[in-house]
Amino acid sequence: MNAGFCLLLCGTPDTPKFNGTASRLISYFDDIDILNDEQKVKAAIRYADFDEAELWEILREVSAANPDWAVFTTTVKKYYPGCQATSQYCRVDLTNLIQDY
């Protein structure tokens, strides 16, 4: 790992955020894509909501000696059906939209 690498504090305005919504997963991974593979995996877990981070930390791909970002993201996407569709929404999205307005 780079000696100069440090993660930003969670919850600050400049940190990537993932709230567990499948439709937001790909853009979240894109936000983290500027780091090397090991740093990406650590950052993805650190900035995800607690429940998501807890699930991702137990994945075999995370505990590998050299975590592979592509393998990690492919594995995580399996837990979020619909995350790869560009304009796909589900009933929960509609419910949240109605509640917001």
Image: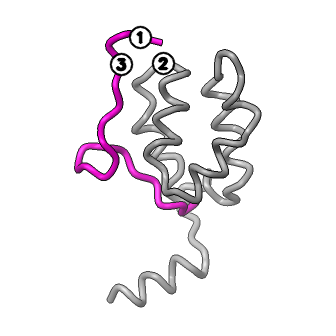
Which is nearer the N-term, disc 1 or disc 2? Answer: 1
Along the viewing direction, whichever of 63 and 95 lies nearer the viewer: 63
Which is nearer the N-term, disc 3 or disc 2? Answer: 3
Mark 1 touches mark 2? (CB < 8 Å): yes
Circle 2 sits in a helix, a strand or a loop, which is it? loop
Residue extending furthest toward the left: 13
The vertical placement of 37 against 88, above or below, is above
Figure disc tally: 3
Q: Is 33 included in the stretch rendered in magenta?
A: no
**In the rendering, which numbered label is found on residue 19?**
none
Image quadrant in which you'd find residue 63: top right
Circle 1 sits in a helix, a strand or a loop, which is it? loop
Q: Residue at x 65, y 22 (%)?
A: 68
Mark 3 touches mark 1? (CB < 8 Å): yes
Residue type (three-letter) at the residue carrying disc 1: Asn
Image quadrant in which you'd find residue 2: top left
Q: Residue at x 36, y 19 (%)?
A: 5
Q: How far apart in space, not on screen, are marks 3 and 1 (Cα)?
A: 5 Å
Residue type (three-letter) at the residue carrying disc 3: Phe
**In the rendering, which numbered label is found on residue 36?**
2
Q: Nearer the viewer, mark 3 or mark 2?
A: 3
Q: How far apart in space, not on screen, are marks 3 and 2 (Cα)?
A: 10 Å
Residue that numbered label 3 is attached to: 5
Residue type (three-letter) at the residue carrying disc 2: Asn
Q: Residue at x 74, y 49 (%)?
A: 78
Along the viewing direction, whichever of 30 and 15 lies nearer the viewer: 15
Q: Is 9 included in the stretch rendered in magenta?
A: yes
The residues colored magenta run 1-22
